[in-house]
Image (cartoon, grey):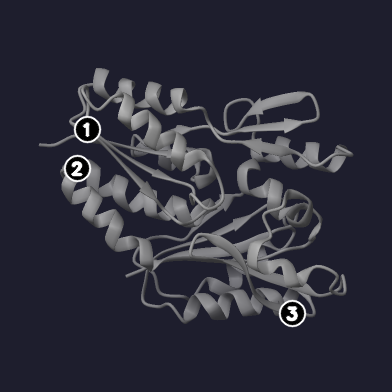
Amino acid sequence: MAHVRVISDSSCDLPEEIARRLDIEIVSLSIRFGDEEFTDRVDLTPAEFWAKCKASKTLPATAAPAPGAFQAAYERAHDDGCDGVIAITLSAALSATHQAAVLASEAVNAKIPVRVIDSKAASIALGLLVLDVAEAAQSGATLDELDELAQRQLSKVGVIAMLDTLEHLVKGGRIGGARALIGQVLAIKPLIELSNGVVAEAGRQRTRAKALAAISAVARTHTPLRRLAVVHGDSSELHNLEALVADIPIEFPLIIADMGPTVGTHGGPGIIGVAWLEA
């Protein structure tokens, strides 16, 4: 039976227990607060990150992993006797992470076959894709089969979220198609989505409650769903959004994910949304 290791990066926001259970190796991005640098998921948890955000006068900055970090992960897979690696990364339009994964794959191609997939997604939307592929890998799917599965599922993944503040997105320069939101009345809660791998505006609502209802309504338009996740960055609205999506039919249990620093740096505290994988 084939044994292919699935590798992703720390922007995927997959809960640790899922990553461990499915032998998903996660290559970390780094986060800087001024002169302090941290390795995502290694020496900075989501809770610690949000606490630092509140205490820090400067916005944090993220940096993609060096190609060497991916190369080391590929070589570990080789040393563990894996037949191949499939690496599924954060949208190439948002980060140099994908490029680092590709460069690393070229360095090990004499040792182990590696396929690198640009998810065109971020946060738990990427995580759901990684989870789906990792479950197939555990069932013994070959590298070619996993590559085909990932390519098929790319168009079935989506995410929509409410920003509680625009400060991080504007200062981080990641606003893309959502630029028109700048200068809007602060009471309005903007919704964002990923479109072709970049951040785009997905509407505006006058209150948090209306924004959450809109998020739930969007998820329903994509049913039937294979997977559904609620993701948030230290949001007080978690239980409210959970309740709104509780009756959406899904094949697998609802996942609750903490948004980590990689995406949270740009989304800001209080961000909350859902990601899905269509059936």
Element type where label 3 sits in the image? strand
Q: Nearer the viewer, residue 123 or 207?
A: 123
Residue type, label 2 = Leu
Residue type, label 3 = Gln
Measure the alpha-carbon separation of dots 1 and 3: 47 Å
Measure the alpha-carbon separation of dots 2 and 1: 8 Å
Q: Could you say where residue 29 lies in the image, as x and y percent from the top left?
A: 57, 34
Residue at left 45%, top 50%? 127
Question: Residue 204: which quarter of the image?
Answer: bottom right
- Quadrant of the snapshot with the N terminus: top left
- Quadrant of the snapshot with the C terminus: bottom left
Q: Is 229 positioned to the left or the right of 60 in the image?
A: left
Residue type, label 1 = Pro
Label for residue 205? 3
Toward the top, the furthest residue is: 79
Q: Is 125 positioned to the left or the right of 25 in the image?
A: right
Q: Could you say where residue 236 lies in the image, as x and y percent from the top left?
A: 75, 59
Q: Could you say where residue 145 lies in the image, as x and y percent from the top left?
A: 17, 50
* Residue named by callout 1: 113
Q: Is 54 positioned to the left or the right of 198 in the image?
A: right
Label for residue 143? 2
Q: How crowded is the residue under tag 3: few (<14 C-alpha within 10 Å), some, or many (20+)?
A: some
Element type where label 1 sits in the image? loop
Toward the left, the furthest residue is: 1
Observer able to see residue 20: no
Q: Nearer the viewer, residue 112 or 10?
A: 112
Label for residue 45? none
Do callouts 2 and 1 mark residues in contact (Cβ within 8 Å)? yes
